[in-house]
Structures are given as structure tokens and as C-alpha cells.
Image: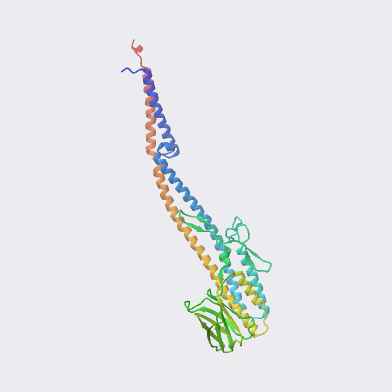
Amino acid sequence: MRVSSETLRAAFLSALDTAQRRLVETQAQVASGKRVNNPSDDPLAAARIAHLDASLARLDQYQANGVIARNQLGLEENSLGAAIDDLQSVKELVVQANNATISSSDRQVIANELRQRRDALLTLANNTDSDGRYLFGGYSENGAPFSVAAGGNVVYNGDQGQRTLQISDTRFVAINDSGAQVFQNIPNGNGTFAIAANAANTGTGTLGAGTVIDAAAWVDDSYTISFTSATAYEVRDSGNVLVASGSFVPPAQSVQFRGANVQIDGTPAVGDRFSVVPSSQTDVFATLDGLIAALEAPVSDPASGALLHSRVGQGMADLDQALSHVIDTRAQIGARVRALDQEATLSEDFSVHLQTTLSSIRDLDYPEAMSRLSQQLFGIDVAQKSYARMQGLSLFQYL
């Protein structure tokens, strides 16, 4: 078969073009450090690389969300820690005020201090983050969640929402708690029932602790403990049905009925009454307002003094409930932070695994690539020289 010079030239140029394209690909790989720079380099590997990149980007976002969540929870935890300190200081002041030897002027001083503590707690409840968003407003983060109404009571203006951030494919973590959940919705009394002395009592009977001694026997109803004499009492429910009765031996005795135990100290008078009602939800500000009002009430005789101690004592019980509630909320925040730490560790480990897999698919084997590059350069150089010599061949040189 006759091979013309033009055919040889076309074949050489085609082979040279292919070799140069391979050289350019190798040079691009060496420059980028990646074996796959374009989907056409390795379609299957390119698809796996895209999937791994997406997974790594998602993990990076989860880790960023975790940092944001940890910062927000840290701010809330600090606020709650300050609130706990404030409530513990209030408790110390109330214990001091409930001393029978303290004067009215001293109680007024303590009441003024409680008012300052209440205002400090209100400031904490309206704390904001670094972006000016209110921590305890629920979803309503742009307006102060708590304000003082015209009557002086504190009202909640936020909602019940709880913002969350996604920290893994299947896990979300709450980054705030609504003010209603933290500072309101607190059961009063002992959590099962609350007790109170009638304001019209004329004796010196003072309420002590109210406890549940048999939860199964407790019936959720309103009860009235009435003294038919200084040494006899009866307990009736909301339907005026007699539940229990007995003798009372001053100066202290427990009145028990339907699984409840109510301690009464002092000497009640005939007609004195004490109420036992199912526990209801209140807020910490109302508890402080009640304590302030109790301390500021005038004490002119033993009966009013007994009423003061009953009110302060029950206010202390409500204060204990509020303090326990805030402590529990703070503990929940600690659990969320622990969850963030666990997810961060898992995410980092998984990210290392994905990066290792990605490197094995995408990254270039430099020794092999440099050897290949050297061979390709050498091949192109030899081909060009050979072609040049072939172009110089002609029969006219031998004539």
C-alpha cells in the first residue's frame, strides 16, 4: 500500500495533538494537586467527589450551628445563674424578715431590698444577646418580653416559642427558653396543694409546712380547716362535706386528711380558718410581690403577727418552688450543651473519615504524576525530532 507524505503528516499531527492534550491534563493535575479536575477526567469519581463535598459542607454548617447554639445557651445559662443568686439572696432576706423579734421598720427595709431584687430579676428576664435579640421572648425576640403593667404587676409580652438549630441530620437543639416557661408556669405551694390563713383569723395559729404523706390518697379539691374551738377542728371539702375532724393540742399539731399533712403552730381561735387548695401556676414576680406586700402589712396585735408569719411562710414555699424551677431549667441547658459537645465530637470524627475518603479519590499521586509528566514530555520531544528528520528525507538527495 502506498503511503503518501500527506498521510504521514496527518497521522503524526493527530498523534501529537493527543499527546499534547494528555500532557496538558497531567500539568493541570500537578498544578492543582487533584487527580480529578473535571467530570470528564473520571465521571464516576467526580460523582463521588460531589457527594462527599456536599456531605462535608453540611457537616461544616452543623458545626457552625453548634457554635451559635453554644453561645446562645451560654448567655441564657449566665442569666439564669444570676437569677438563682438573686433568688437565693431573696430567700435569705425573707428568713431574716420572718423573725418574730424584728421591728416593722426593719421589715420595711427588707421589703425595699426585695423590691430592688425584683427589679434586678426583671432586668435579667429582659436580657439580650450580642445582636440585641431578647433571650426569653420565645419567637418574639425583638421586643422586651416582660414589662410592668399599670397596676405594678409584671406581665409577659412574648410567646411560648422555642427556637431550635439543626446540629446533625436527625437532631435539633433548643437554643432558648421562653420567659413564660422560665419565670412563669411555676406551681405554688408544695406542687400538689397550697395553704393559706384567712385574713379574718383572730387567733395566733400560724401555718407551717404543708406536705403530701400519701399521694394515692390525695383528692384534688379545695378544703377548709375550721376551728370549732381552740382545741377542735374539722376539715370540709368544696361541697361542705366533712372530710376529717379531731382535737387540736396547742402549741403545735399536724392536721392530716386525704394524704395531706398541714402543720399549724400557735393557738387558733374559734372560727379561725385555713384553706388548702390544689396547686396552681404562678410567676416568680407575683411571689416576690406577695412577699413584699406581706412584709409591708401593719402588725398591731398577735393575730396580725400570726397572719404575717403564715403569709411569709407560704411565700417562702412559693419561692422555693421558683428557685427549684429555675435551677431545673438551668440543668436542662447543661444537658443541651452536653448534647452539642457529643454531636461536635461525632461530627469531627465523621468529617475526618469523609476527608480521608475524598483524598483517596480526588488527590493526586505526585510521584506517579511526575513520572508520567516526564515520560510525556520525553515522548513529545522524540516525536517532534523524528518527524523533523522524516520531513528531510527525499530521493533527490541520492541523485
284 or 97, nearer to the observer:
284
Furthest residue in direction top, as rendered: 399
Q: How is the image coloured?
A: rainbow
Q: Residue 385: image x %, image y %?
A: 38, 23
Q: Is residue 14 above or below residue 318?
A: above
Q: Residue 34: image x %, image y %?
A: 43, 40
Q: Is residue 327 visible?
A: yes
343 or 179, nearer to the observer:
179
Residue visible at 54% across and 79% down in the picture: 210
Q: Residue 199: image x %, image y %?
A: 64, 80
Q: Is residue 55 above or below residue 242?
A: above
Q: Residue 93: image x %, image y %?
A: 61, 75
Q: Which quadrant, please, contains the N terminus?
A: top left
Q: Which quadrant, please, contains the C terminus?
A: top left
Q: Is residue 119 visible?
A: no
Quarter residue 384 falls in: top left
Q: Is residue 254 above or below residue 359?
A: below
Q: Is residue 307 above or below residue 23?
A: below
188 or 119, nearer to the observer:
188
Picture mark count: 0
Quarter residue 159 falls in: bottom right
48 or 170, nearer to the observer:
170
